Amino acid sequence: MRLRLGSLTLDTATRQLLRGTSEVHLSPKAFDLLTLLVETRPRAVAKAELQNELWPDVFVSETNLAGLVAADASSLYARNVLDFLKLVIDKEGKFQVPMDDDIVAACLMTQGGEVKRK
């Protein structure tokens, strides 16, 4: 399955998450979690289903499950922030905002004194 999620493309056949042509690196469990959530949307996934699908032969307590899911989400968020910083800081360390970039357009709230998104 190949699915576009905003500026991201999830490809379950190659087990890749791409932003444009750049791969977003995820742990195998984080990739499995994202795939499960996408495949079951818009339905909410119960903790028991997460445990059965992602850790079928391993006992994972509710506390550890929440921690593992949070760690994977935090890791993905941190990578996205790092990718964003790489986008807006040029090789000389100067702040440069490429206004035509998809990520910038999605985050842009105001421009030139005009409100773009409320």
Image (cartoon, rainbow, N blue to C red):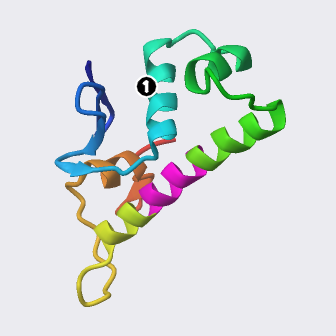
Residue located at (67% from left, 42% from top): 68
| Horizontal arrangement in the rendering, residue 28 relative to residue 72 (left or right) | left
Tag 1 residue: 35
Residue 35 picture quarter: top left
Residue 78: horizontal and vertical position, in percent?
Answer: 51, 59
Q: Residue furthest left?
A: 21
Q: Residue furthest front?
A: 57
Residue 92: horizontal and vertical position, in percent?
Answer: 25, 90
Magenta run includes residue 86: no
Residue located at (73% from left, 34% from top): 65
Q: Which one is in front, 95 or 6?
A: 6
| Horizontal arrangement in the rendering, residue 53 relative to residue 85 (left or right) | right
Residue 66 picture quarter: top right
Residue 77: horizontal and vertical position, in percent?
Answer: 52, 52
Callout 1: 10 Å neighbours few (<14), some, many (20+)?
some
Magenta part, dominant SS: helix
Residue span colored magenta = 73-81
Relative to 76, is 7 above or below?
above
Q: Residue furthest bottom?
A: 92
Residue 88 picture quarter: bottom left
